[in-house]
Amino acid sequence: METSPVGKPKPKLDLKNTDGNAFVLIAAGSRALRASHTPEEISQFREEATSGDYNNVLMTLGKWCDVKICTDDDDDDYDDDYDDDDDYDDDYDDDDDYE
């Protein structure tokens, strides 16, 4: 099991359907850490997360939490939405434009 920077197990953090705003992400990470980390450790997480840019927020979340954004099932649903059999381009014929 992976551990956070303070040596405790990383809590699971599912960010599916979570607003991508940096402060929303930091709050979600803080809530996830409450179960296994002290208030001082959560403050350390927040300080680290807010010490840089948006990428730093994401990297810090990954250091402290076991982050999950979507499931494999969600990926299958996404692929189904973009089926190769779509006929949206069948009405367009390249040859008509160049005669």
Image: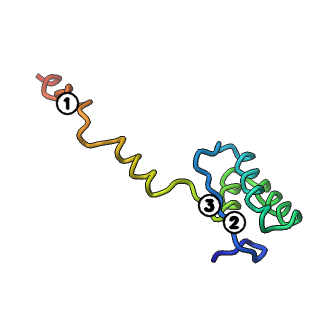
Image height of 23 relative to 61, above or below = above
Mark 2 → mark 1, Cα distance in angstroms: 49 Å
Q: Amino acid at mark 1?
A: Asp
Q: Nearer the viewer, residue 51 or 37?
A: 37
Q: Amino acid at mark 3?
A: Val
Image height of 18 relative to 65, above or below = above
> Which numbered dot is residue 13?
none
Q: Position of residue 48 (x, y in %)?
A: 79, 61
Image height of 24 relative to 36, above or below = above
Q: Nearer the viewer, mark 2 or mark 1?
A: 2
Q: Mark 1 highlights which residue?
A: 90
Q: Are marks 2 and 3 in contact (CB under 8 Å)?
A: no
Counting residues from the start of the chain, the first of labels 2 and 3 encountered is 2
Q: Are marks 3 and 1 in contact (CB under 8 Å)?
A: no
Left or right, residue 51 beside residue 71: right
Q: Position of residue 89 (x, y in %)?
A: 24, 31
The residue sitting at 80% across, 61% down in the picture is 34
Q: Mark 2 highlights which residue?
A: 11
Q: Mark 3 highlights which residue?
A: 67
Left or right, residue 28 beside residue 77: right
Q: Position of residue 80 (x, y in %)?
A: 34, 45
Mark 3 → mark 1, Cα distance in angstroms: 41 Å
How packed is label 3: few (under 14 Cα within 10 Å), some, or many (20 or more)? some
The residue sitting at 13% across, 27% down in the picture is 95
- Mark 2 falls on what kind of element? loop
The residue sitting at 89% across, 65% down in the picture is 40
How packed is label 1: few (under 14 Cα within 10 Å), some, or many (20 or more)? few
Left or right, residue 62 beside residue 52: left
Q: Quadrant of the N terminus?
A: bottom right
The residue sitting at 70% across, 50% down in the picture is 25
